[in-house]
Amino acid sequence: MLKSYAGPFVLTFFIALFILLMQFLWKYIDDLVGKGLELDVVLRLLFYAGATFVPMALPLAILLSSLMTFGNLGEHYELVAMKSAGISVWKVMRPLIWLSVGISIFAFFFSNNLLPVANLKFQSLLYDVRQQKLAFNINEGIFYNGIENYVIRVGEKENDGRTIYDVHIYDHTDRLGNIKVTTAASGYMELGHDHQSIIFTLFDGYSFTDIHSTRNYRENRPFERTAFKQQRLKFDLSDFNLTRTQEDLFKNHYTMLNIKQLNYYIDSLNIRLAERKLRYEENFIRRFNHLSSLDTTFKPEKTIMRPADRLLVSAQDTSSKDTLITAQKAIVMPVLENFPPNERVAVTDLAINSVRTTKDNIVFNKNDFSVQLENIRKHEWVWHKKFTLSFACLILFFIGAPMGAIIRKGGLGLPVVISVLFFVAYHITSITGEKAAKVGDLSMFTGVWLSSMVLLPVGLFLAFKATTDASLLDTDSWRKFFNRMKNRIGSKKQTA
């Protein structure tokens, strides 16, 4: 059993890993092509990326390999022979169950110890690759600005890739625009001995320099022109080398922590959030302590006219000055009557500005609390994901093995279709629950473990059907079942 299971498991695992790597290359192809990356850099990037895809490839491989293994046994009637010899399906599955438990333990060890390191290496290297400049490549008739503070245009290039014609080089090192321009009829390019620079050897050209140190140079536009038969220009290419960023800048991200570190960060973030809320509450009460003595049951004797009522009054009698005056007086709060008439507008503006400032402060702190709470939830999400990978391996085995025994089909045909359907259902349910948990619509435990809670009953149901020799996919049994239901419904109608 172990030998028949090991081959499909290794095969399906690397096939799933290869597909995920191709998806990664398709996603980041624009960041990798044309940058002159060395082979060892590309291989390391693919290795680290493949390590981060193990949590997705491993459950799919277990599901597909277990379904293929028991499908082959059922297709060649080996399961029937074992059952006739008195060996139950549970005994047949027992070695693979222990193997799945071992794989689950390895999955937890990988997720807790190796995956954070792989994420750190992968994310830091991918960041450096994406920040890397494109390789030095000048095309005909196109302005090339890959070299800092210089723009180069070549009218024509020979097939050898080094001989050039109609050369224009714009020097922007002074940050004053195109005040230094070099033109040449021909020339050639070559790398320096250190491969860190490129040397242009130009022939039959001119160098133009605008003189901007004289008075009224903007009106007169004086310039110097220097003719040359041959000129050599050297440009530094060190910026095109891959510069590695220190990994310490990434190591505190929540996807790069193990369980012990996550527990520490979650506790620290919760304490910091609680202190932040307490400090804000104390400052708010200290700043607006007069609100505690405000009588909220106070009702003004004069009614306050709403803006719509004011428009209605003014529309009814726009020519009546008395009506407008009455409407304006009705708006005045009794509090404002304590101030002189010439100060009421200033007091009102001050109150409005104070309310706006307070509202902005409340909105800002509310958003800050939401961001901190979301950060805590992300740490909790990664903490739970350390365990869901191991549990998913067991659940998908108990789905794949009984399903293979029921369908009795091996190979890469029907088992692949069924495995993909189950895995897509698992993946969609997992993503939906995790997104709901991250935004706070579900508790973190419910959101992260939702896919496991949905598929666990399915696995137990299939295991029960496989061990009891139930004809789950037999069309005749389903036809008989629906006929019995139809007869029962018909008999009930006749009795009524």
Image (cartoon, grey):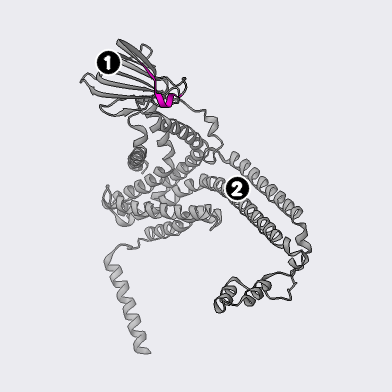
Question: Which segment is the magenta one?
Answer: 216-224
The quarter of the displayed image where residue 27 is located: top left
Q: Residue beneath label 2, please?
A: 372
- Seen from the viewer's position, the closer of residues 94 and 110 is 110
Residue 219 on the magenta span: yes
Foreground label between 1 and 2? 1
Would you say residue 305 sits in the magenta stretch? no
Residue ID at (52%, 54%): 437
Viewer-proximal residue, 366 or 54? 366
Q: Give the mark nearest the N terminus, 1 or 2.
A: 1
Q: Secondary structure at mark 2?
A: helix
What is the residue that sits farthest to the top in this orientation?
A: 229
Give coordinates of residue 222: x percent, y percent.
39, 20
The quarter of the rendered structure image containing the C terminus is bottom left
Give the residue at the far left of this rendering.
Answer: 159
Residue ID at (32%, 29%)? 34
Q: Is residue 266 left or right of residue 174?
A: right
Residue type pointed to by label 2: Gln
Identified at 41% across, 33% down, the residue is: 130
Instruction: Identify whether 318 is placed above or below 83.
Output: below
Measured from the top left, where is residue 178 in percent x and y?
38, 25
Q: Quarter of the image containing the N terminus? A: top left
- Give me the disc on residue 188: 1
- Dot 1 falls on a residue whose secondary structure is strand
Which residue is pictured at 35% across the width and 86% down the height? 493
Residue 159 at what x, y percent from top left?
A: 20, 21
